[in-house]
Image (spheres, rainbow, N blue to C red):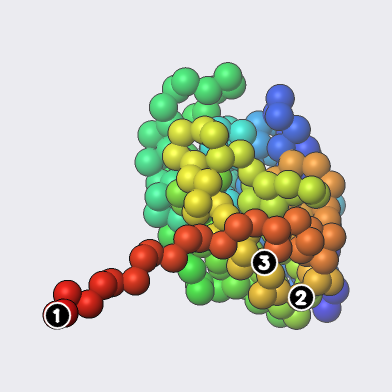
């Protein structure tokens, strides 16, 4: 059955949340939880008759988790994220520009795990660089990525903030070159793009330097 992806924008950084549902089974997930989106998502879920069986958090930055507690409570849905994000979900630091109520992480997701939405299967990819615990969801059959802050039209997530790593980001971005050009990417901010539109500049990213060859000390 067709997969529906609805975007909800919330918070001062205009962060995207997505309601992803299988129209045949009514099975659904929500990806990310910026502040101020819980009511609109709940209304959409109720109107469609969908059942949200998971809230997936792509990474632990405040603008993606500030609405998590309210959304999880309103939907009665468990929360899943990478283990490196647990601390920020359950014990937020309190230095964010908006309140981030603590929420409960019910399960962990990592590389090669799968998230299902009805008959649709998403592969979990651990994609650090912008955040150590960043994951995304990739459906090969649907040619679709729910990408968080890894890839945007013409660029990528910031690497000049605490926890970011430019070299890790470059390695993450190069992984997209192994995926088909027609894959549509739904990012954490702004409009969707395709991998084909982004492949040219990703190919220009310098490859990591190889370590020098070990010298023969026998002679």
Q: Residue furthest left?
A: 218
73 vs 7, nearest the viewer: 7
Can you tell which quarter of the image residue 194 is in?
bottom right
**Residue 11 visible in the snapshot:** yes
Of callouts 1 and 3, the N-terminal one: 3
Report the residue at 70% width, 74% height from top.
179
Q: Position of residue 177 (x, y in %)?
A: 69, 70
| Residue that badge 3 annotates | 176
The numbered dot on residue 180 is 2
Please state which of the two labelled residues, at mark 1 or mark 3, is closer to the viewer: 1
Report the residue at 41% width, 27% height from top.
93
| Residue that badge 1 annotates | 218
| Residues at marks 3 and 2, CA–CA distance in whole angstroms | 8 Å
Q: Residues within 10 Å of mark 3 (few under 14, many from 20)?
A: some
Can you tell which quarter of the image residue 193 is in?
bottom right
Location of the C terminus by quadrant is bottom left
Q: Position of residue 11 (x, y in %)?
A: 70, 29
Q: Do the CB atoms of the residues marked 3 and 2 lie less than 8 Å apart? A: no
101 vs 45, nearest the viewer: 101
Q: Position of residue 18 (x, y in %)?
A: 74, 51
Of callouts 2 and 1, the N-terminal one: 2
Helix, strand or loop for disc 2:
loop
Can you tell which quarter of the image residue 13 is in?
top right
Location of the N terminus by quadrant is bottom right
| Residues at marks 2 and 1, CA–CA distance in whole angstroms | 48 Å
Report the residue at 73% width, 47% height from top.
155
Report the residue at 56% width, 62% height from top.
207
């Amino acid at each position: 059955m067709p997969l529906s992806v609805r975007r909800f924008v919330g918070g001062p950084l205009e962060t995207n949340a997505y309601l992803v549902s299988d129209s045949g089974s009514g099975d659904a997930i929500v990806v990310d939880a910026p502040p101020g989106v819980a009511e609109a998502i709940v209304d959409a879920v109720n109107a469609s008759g969908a059942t949200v069986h998971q809230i997936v958090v792509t990474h632990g930055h405040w603008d993606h988790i500030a609405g998590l507690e309210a959304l999880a409570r309103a939907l009665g849905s468990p929360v899943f994220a990478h283990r490196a994000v647990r601390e920020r979900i359950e014990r937020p630091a309190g230095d964010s520009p908006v309140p981030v109520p603590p929420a409960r992480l019910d399960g962990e997701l990592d590389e090669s795990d799968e998230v299902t939405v009805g008959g649709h299967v998403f592969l979990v990819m651990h994609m650090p660089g912008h955040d150590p615990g960043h994951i995304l969801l990739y459906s090969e059959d649907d040619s679709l990525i729910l990408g968080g802050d890894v890839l945007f039209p013409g660029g990528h997530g910031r690497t000049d903030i605490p926890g970011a790593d430019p070299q890790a980001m470059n390695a993450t971005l190069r992984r997209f070159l192994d995926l088909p050009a027609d894959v549509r990417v739904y990012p954490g901010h702004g409009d969707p793009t395709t991998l084909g539109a982004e492949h040219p500049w990703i190919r220009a990213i310098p490859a990591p330097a190889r370590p020098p060859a070990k010298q023969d000390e026998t002679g």
